[in-house]
Amino acid sequence: MCGIFGYIGDSNASEVIVRGLKRLEYRGYDSWGIAVAAQNALSIAKQVGPIGDVEKKLDLPMSTAGIGHTRWATHGRVTRINAHPHFSTDLSFALAQNGIVENYKELQKRLIKLGYTFYTETDTEVIVRLIEHEKKKTSSLLDAVRKAFMQLEGRNTIALITIEGEIIAARNGSPLVVGRNTTNKALYISSDTLSFAPFVDSMYLVDNGQLVRAVGTNIYCQNISTGKSIPMQYEPVSTRHSEVDKAGYEHFMLKEIHENPLVIAALLKQPAEEYERLAQAIKNARRVYTIGSGTAGIAAAQIAFYLREYAHVDAVSLVGADAKEYYDYFTPDDLIIAPSQSGETADVLEVLEHAHSKKAVIASFVNMPGSIMSRISDFAFMAQAGPEICVMSTKIFVSQIAWGYLLAKTIAGKRSDAINQLNKLARDMDDYLKKSKTHTELRRIARILSKKHDIFLMGKYQNLQIVREGMVKLIEGTYKHAHAIAAGDLKHYAITLMEDGVVVITAISRDSVYNDMVNAIHEVKARGATVIGISAEEEEGMDIHIPVPKETETSAIMHVVPLQLLAYYMAKLLGNNIDRPRNIAKSVTVK
């Protein structure tokens, strides 16, 4: 969740770190902090709130080495004292963490008995005191870090800086990557490549159980448990999709919604051979599982729908945090598909790691290069959608479900048909987004919806997961209660909530369940509900019609766009922070 960034080079470290943290802010924006080494001492600046709001020069000395952190709070309130980095008692080092120390209470009690004092409410301070304790047993800070880190339970990555400007970072679960610029010899460490991509030419993906130590512009890697050296094999870094810019749009969310057609077009340029290889593996599988969390979990469910509907594959969708009951059922004959923006989602990775141990085949569709998910996959597909900065996912969701549709049609031997349909969809979606009438009408409907406390959405078949994603976007962006209803379940429970003043948003396609959806519209309308319908043609019973281009098999993907725009315009009307909704972060690297 949190973001870690470190730098050693010739530039002013605090300025470099601020730039890096701003590019990491989607990982957490409750508070931030920077520690720099200068004149054999450490100086720290910490504040509550987003780093993006910092405009004035920081009160930090000129330095060529430092670390920074942007926080999503897990243990401890959002306060300045709880912000990272945290000082050691003797001020000889400062440490930042991404993760959760699951056994921190046990460690803290032991350390208190040994005489250590705690000043914050965080689990991170336990790591600091534990390193201090281990340091008393050895003359090497590096060994103290190794021994302390091995006592931590849970997914954790840490980075610390010493008064001499040495940086040590260790990883178990939460991401860590090293970047270097071979021209100016600058070194970077970070939670992801996006933060330093424009400034480096190569990177090293630190693996679980590894530790790196940077002294000056030299960096070394070793195994945490054995202390043995590990050669660092660097990979080139592409800056093609590294620009973080609103490109004239008021918010990243609006820009990224407008990029929906581009991410579909990017899919169609990918080589067919990899799709064919995965298609064959799916045909050979006993069962296919799709898995994700949050929006990616909804994408996983839509991918499973496409696999069942168009490829006639036995596909079951799972939610990352609630898949434990399936662990005993994974076999080497199964295949698991995981869509993810970051490729670092903790609860999904836990399932994949278990499936990997059972020798199940893993396929992933990820947008972030170098992720753990990609590295443990037998089939690793990249979205190539460019950075998605808004915490609310829009273009990546569209990319994920379009990929799932293309994959399903490839399995069915109808790839060329899918490409034609997706090409048409991309063109129509682009036209739809460019029309001022589209935005004028959705702003008008957003004004109506923004006055409602409860919003219902209803769908079926190919549109069921789409209205669920609409629900997620409305909740994330507006902080209002939204509830997605399976139209077929309406009469079993949700119809009790239908009365005068209730709003129901529907998405309807001219498919095999069309008549069922029309009937459901009449049923809620008969109880007094106001019906807002998203469809190519206005249907009887709709009080407000949101017209969209007419698609066939891809109509559900088209229906996503007005729901995203409604969430955007409602959030704007309500004065909410659109790109950084409260209490959530984009990359959920803790459980």
Image (spheres, rainbow, N blue to C red):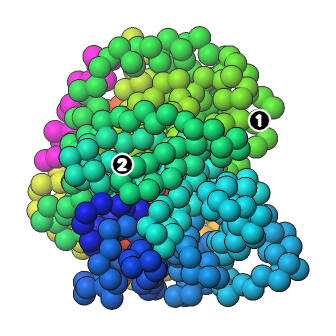
Instruction: Assign the magenta stretch its main secondary structure.
Output: helix
Magenta region: which residues?
Answer: 414-431
What residue would you read off at disc 1?
Answer: 327
User: Which of disc 2 and disc 1 is earlier in sequence?
Assistant: 2
Decide if residue 223 is on the left or right side of residue 537: right
What label does residue 528 carry, if any? none
Q: Amino acid at mark 2?
A: Gly
> Residue at 84% across / 69% down in the picture?
106
Q: CA distance from mark 1 to mark 2?
A: 36 Å
- The image quadrant where one finds the C terminus is bottom right
Q: Is residue 569 above or below residue 360?
A: below
Decide if residue 130 is on the left or right side of residue 392: right
Percent position of residue 83, x then y: 53, 80
The secondary element bearing badge 1 is classed as helix
What label does residue 179 carry, if any? 2
Residue 102 in view: no
Percent position of residue 228, x then y: 63, 38
Q: Is residue 217 above or below residue 574?
A: above
Percent position of residue 72, x then y: 53, 71
Percent position of residue 405, x then y: 40, 30
Q: Amino acid at mark 1?
A: Tyr
Q: Nearer the viewer, residue 474 or 381?
A: 381
Residue 357 in view: yes
Q: Is residue 45 magenta?
A: no
Decide if residue 199 is on the left or right side of residue 107: left
> Residue at 71% across / 29% down in the picture?
357
Decide if residue 302 is on the left or right side of residue 274: right
Q: Is residue 426 magenta?
A: yes
Q: Nearer the viewer, residue 319 or 37?
A: 37
